[in-house]
Image (cartoon, rainbow, N blue to C red):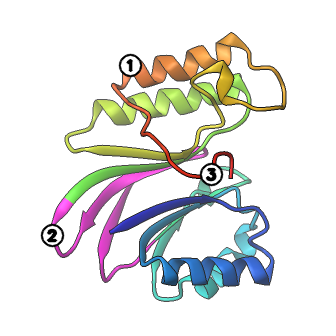
Amino acid sequence: MKLVTWNVRGLNKLYKQKEMKEFIKENNIAIIAIVEHRVTELVAKKIKNKIAPQWNWCNNYGTGDRGRIWLLWDPNRVSFTVEVTHVQLIHGQVCILDSKMRFSFTTIYGLHTIGDQRSLWHELRQIENDQARPWLAMRDFNAVLNIEDRINGNQIQESEVKNFKDFMNDCHMAELRSIGAMYT
């Protein structure tokens, strides 16, 4: 079972929708989290139906005016039960239907300021307190663990690193090793 997250700007464009649909099919994706898509709530369902017409989905439009997170899943292979919808995350339980394997999954699109991120760290700590299963938290925290993790851009402040590291330590989280292209 493949679970993917994708930070995709410009999903309003037909060529991006086609690219997303082909990517899901060609890579045999079962769950995909799409963040920072810049799609308004008024056209969201129409675009979702072009990408994955038979799939179930949820979003976080109800948490604020920007709703930048979608979670789509193939109901023939997995089920997803939403437990928390927040302006910066969607959290719930995944069940892989053919194996009955279950795990918690959180997809994240963190806001950019330290002040805005406080509610993200708080909500994630609350989620961690309730965990009884393996937990996978993925996507764009808009925070870095180490000062050298950012190439170019604004210089990183120690408080940016500290808050994310504190969250990781408090929740016993570990960064998964990545391979392939960085910053793509």
Element carrying mark 1: helix
Q: Are marks 1 and 3 in contact (CB under 8 Å)?
A: no
| Residue matched to label 2 | 99
- How far apart marks 1 and 3 lie (CA) works out to 29 Å
Specify whether 49 is left or right of 28: right
The residue under the point 67% across, 79% down is 19
Element carrying mark 2: loop
The residue under the point 37% across, 51% down is 105
Type of amino acid under label 2: Ser
The residue nearer to you, when weighing 63 against 177, is 177
Type of amino acid under label 3: Ala
The residue under the point 21% across, 57% down is 102
The label on residue 65 is none
Q: Is residue 13 magenta?
A: no
Is any atom of residue 84 visible in this view?
no
Compared to residue 150, the image places residue 10 above or below, namely below
Q: Can you name the residue that lies furthest to the left here?
A: 99
